[in-house]
């Protein structure tokens, strides 16, 4: 899995705003300076975060940007959904990886273990990220490492994210997929 620059720097901007305290605001130049980013790039990230409902702009003398909710209520899963794309997305995934000579249908239509793998990992990762908040990330590095271990262990033993059943997909051009096993 790759973390994009937008996800990394967007999350850093949120942590910067969280460090201003509940209700505290920071300006674009302040955030840019603290995070080593250009003001233009910071403005673009903040616009995405604002459109996603994670931050709000503050007008006036003490203006700038602030978190739209307390850091303890902003879940990392939500943050990454606003800033990026899912690891796996059905049906686009199968169409994008169908093969060059398959007329848009995956050549593994009846026996794809990869589709189930990527979907299950996506569900597990999102479920785990939804258990973490910005406030959790405000802890020291050693504390966050232990917290992550705990939350990951909880996710492993939590039965909510179900595994995807490996069923047979029907390919309209292949009469073999219409037969019952």
Image: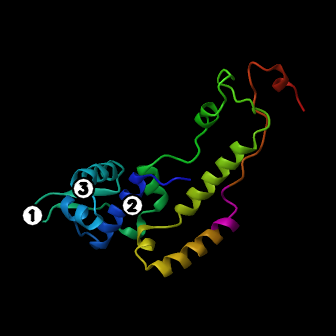
Q: Which mark is residue 38?
A: 3
Res. 20 image quadrant: bottom left
Q: Nearer the viewer, residue 150 or 22?
A: 150
Is residue 63 placed above or below 151 in the rendered structure? above
Residue 138 horizontal side relative to residue 176, left or right: left
Label 1 Cα crowd, 10 Å radius (few <14 / some 14-19 / many 20+): few
Residue 167 percent coordinates (x, y): 78, 39
C-alpha separation, residue under disc 3 versus residue under disc 1: 22 Å
Sequence-wise, the earlier of marks 3 and 1 is 3
Q: Is residue 124 magenta?
A: no
Residue at 19% in and 61% down: 29
Region of the chain picked out in magenta, as a range: 155-161
Label 2 Cα crowd, 10 Å radius (few <14 / some 14-19 / many 20+): some
Residue 69 seen anywhere in this rendered image of the structure: no
Residue wearing tag 1: 61
Residue wearing tag 2: 11
C-alpha separation, residue under disc 2 versus residue under disc 1: 26 Å
């Amino acid at each position: 899995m790759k973390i994009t620059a937008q996800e990394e720097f967007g999350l850093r901007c949120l942590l910067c705003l969280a460090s201003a305290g509940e209700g505290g605001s920071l300006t674009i130049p302040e955030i840019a300076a603290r995070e080593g980013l250009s003001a233009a790039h910071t403005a673009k990230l903040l616009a995405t975060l604002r459109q996603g409902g994670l931050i709000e702009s503050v007008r006036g003398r003490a203006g700038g940007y602030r978190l739209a909710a307390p850091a303890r209520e902003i879940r990392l899963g939500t943050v990454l959904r606003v800033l990026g794309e899912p690891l796996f997305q059905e049906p686009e995934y199968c169409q994008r990886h169908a093969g060059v000579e398959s007329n848009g249908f995956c050549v593994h239509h009846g026996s794809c273990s990869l589709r189930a793998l990527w979907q299950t990992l996506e569900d597990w990762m999102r479920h785990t990220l939804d258990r973490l908040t910005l406030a959790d990330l405000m802890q020291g590095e050693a504390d966050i490492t232990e917290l992550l271990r705990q939350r990951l262990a909880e996710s492993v033993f939590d039965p909510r994210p179900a595994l995807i059943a490996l069923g047979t997909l029907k390919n309209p051009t292949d009469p073999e997929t219409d037969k019952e096993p």
